[in-house]
Structures are given as structure tokens and as C-alpha cells.
Image (cartoon, rainbow, N blue to C red):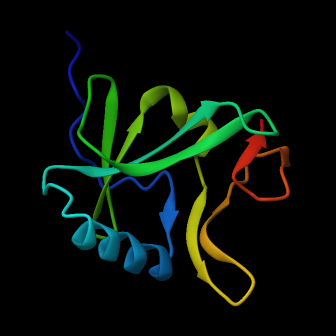
Amino acid sequence: MSEVKQMTDVKPISLTEGALRELNKIRVQENVPEQYGLRVGVKGGGCSGFSYILGFDALKEGDQEYLIDGMRVIMSKSHGIYLLGMEIDYVDGLNNRGFTFNNPNAKDTCGCGTSFSA
């Protein structure tokens, strides 16, 4: 069994104030267990090749854990190359509401902004 990497202050991604506010609100509303962190990742699929994963989850084997502006963030080691430098924001506007992903590694994105190609 491989070892889980200890939490570090390195910040492979960033979370805006709006994203942190909304994530903390969701944590309380959904009664997310304290030991869960925010899982950020990618999966195959979506109209551009990859879709983003964003949700609260327990630490698993092969994960890396980070502390980003007070939020425990969990990422699979293999997803890091697709996510390094990404900014997650939360938009609450008249025409658009939800999390947005500003990913410098994306070569192409879909119109809705939730999938990309690398």
C-alpha cells in the first residue's frame, strides 16, 4: 500500500474569495464531514475531452493534500499536470451562476467552460 502525501502549503491551484465563500456555504448546507477535503480533478469525457471534478471527498491512496487559503484540497497525483496553475472561481451573475475554471493548461475549452482538451 502506498503512502498518502502529507498536507503541504504548496498551492498547485488557486481559489478565489467567491469560490471559497460558496464552498464553505456548501460544506455547511450539506453537512460535509470535517475529515473531507475538496477534491479537484479531471475525468475523461465532456465535449472537449476532459471534464472537471469538484466535490468534497475523503483522502484516498495516491492522493496529495494541500491547504489552500484554509481549504483542504485533495488531488490525485496523476491529475496535477492538467490542473497546475488553475484558478477556480464562483460566479453569481444574472446570466451565469456556478463554478468557473480558468485553466492555463487547456488548449481548447467548450462553450460551457466545464470541459477542456490538453
Picture quadrant where residue 46 is located: top right
| Residue shown at 21% from the left, 58% from the top | 32
Looking at the picture, tell me which residue is in the foreground, 47 or 80: 47
Q: Is residue 23 left or right of residue 6?
A: right
Percent across and percent down for residue 93 are: 66, 88
Percent across and percent down for residue 96 are: 70, 78
Picture quadrant where residue 92 is located: bottom right
> Which residue sits furthest bottom?
94
| Residue shown at 15% from the left, 54% from the top | 33
Image quadrant occupied by the N terminus? top left
> Which residue sits furthest left?
34
| Residue shown at 40% from the left, 51% from the top | 55
Looking at the picture, tell me which residue is in the foreground, 106 or 29: 29
Q: Is residue 49 left or right of residue 97?
A: right
Q: Is residue 68 above or below residue 36?
A: below
Q: Is residue 54 visible?
A: yes
Image quadrant occupied by the C terminus? top right
Percent across and percent down for residue 72 are: 28, 56
Q: Is residue 104 above or below residue 47?
A: below
| Residue shown at 23% from the left, 28% from the top | 4
Percent across and percent down for residue 60 are: 26, 29
Q: Is residue 50 above or below residue 84?
A: above
